Amino acid sequence: MASRALTLFTINMSHYSEKIRWLLDYEEIPYQEIALTPALHTVPMWFKGRRAQTTVPLLQSGKICIQDSPRIVDWLAVHCSPLDSMPSGKQQEILAVQQRFDAIGKPIARYLYLPGFAHDALIRTLWTQFAKPWERRFIALAYPLIKPAFRIKLRINSRAVKQAEQLIDAEIRWLEQRLQQLEPGIKQKEPQETEQPIKGQKEEQGRRSKTCRYLVGDAFSFADIAAASILAPLACPPEHPIYGEEEFREKMAGPAQQWADSAALQWVRDIYAEHRGTVWTRIPVL
Ligand SMILES: N[C@@H](CCC(=O)N[C@@H](CS)C(=O)NCC(=O)O)C(=O)O
């Protein structure tokens, strides 16, 4: 277990952040989340990350800062081992799934912001969900400048969005094929009320409940977290406090309707329903 308290820096809408938040929640690793306001996140992330990058998530443990979600996962696998969701022997396969879905994280953001930017009020509301009063005022004033800068940085233009759509589609098809090859999970016997849970039983039941299919091995693993969290803004699982909202689904994820009934996005919703638990059991620090 990491010897120092962990702080996770995120942006509320960030699916890469959701991946790490879910991993920490699942592994019951204590952490405090600091949800940064978009645009205002750049300076602290640049300085803390020391990689000439401004991205979230970033995990801090004492003076150590780890930026970039796969690097955070690697760090947790060393400093908080053993991770239940990363069984030894399966690690390489699990991390290969993470790599696949990480590659479409930015295309997904690009794909959602194109329609999303037609709804400035929604974007401003989302961006300032956890903002301090002065940050809210800053976003209100600077939004007309931030929006075009963001468009350029994330390449939100119709050509790049078209390419993004093809990449997303290819990955959704890959997931569908993978799911077709998999057996449904095995329904575990429910414990009787009088039965005392034995060590490891809770995890085992949680990892193999109902009839979900799992991407690596026959139990829930970080591979499922990695795929489901990155696809969540397209799948809009009701358990997620932002992606599950009606307004987000209509105004940002509207074009993703083309995949809404696919087995892949249905799988994401099943995995959320079965394994995510509450997002933000503790509201992030402002
Ligand atoms: N490779 C990075 C990508 C993270 C990423 O793109 N994060 C987005 C939010 S989903 C972000 O921070 N965007 C703002 C920025 O780049 O400054 C990771 O896996 O952590």
Image: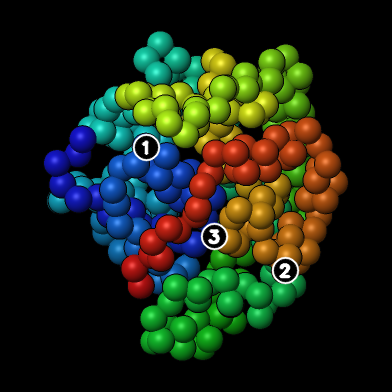
Where residue 76 appears, x then y in whole percent? Answer: 30, 35
Q: CA distance from mark 1 to mark 3?
A: 22 Å
Ligand 1 neighbours mark 3 (CB distance < 8 Å): yes
Where residue 270 appears, x then y in whole percent? Answer: 67, 38
What amino acid is labelled 2 in the image? Glu
**Other residues around mark 3 within 10 Å, as few (<14) / some (14–19) / many (≥20):** some
Q: Is residue 80 left or right of residue 279?
A: left
Q: CA distance from mark 2 to mark 1?
A: 31 Å
Give me the residue at 58% from left, 77% from top. 125
Residue 84 seen in the figure: no
Dot 1 falls on a residue whose secondary structure is helix
Residue that badge 2 annotates: 247
Residue that badge 3 annotates: 13
What amino acid is labelled 1 in the image? Glu
**Other residues around mark 2 within 10 Å, as few (<14) / some (14–19) / many (≥20):** few
Which label number is shown at residue 27?
Answer: 1
Where residue 260 appears, x then y in whole percent? Answer: 80, 45
Residue nearest the observer in this picture, 120 or 238? 238
What amino acid is labelled 3 in the image? Met
Which label number is shown at residue 84?
Answer: none
Instruction: Establish if 87 lies above or below 104.
Output: above
Give me the residue at 43% from left, 77% from top. 131
* Viewer-side label of 2, 1: 1
> Mark 1 or mark 3, which has the lower sequence index?
3
Instruction: Establish if 50 lies above or below 180.
Output: below
Quadrant in which the N terminus appears: top left
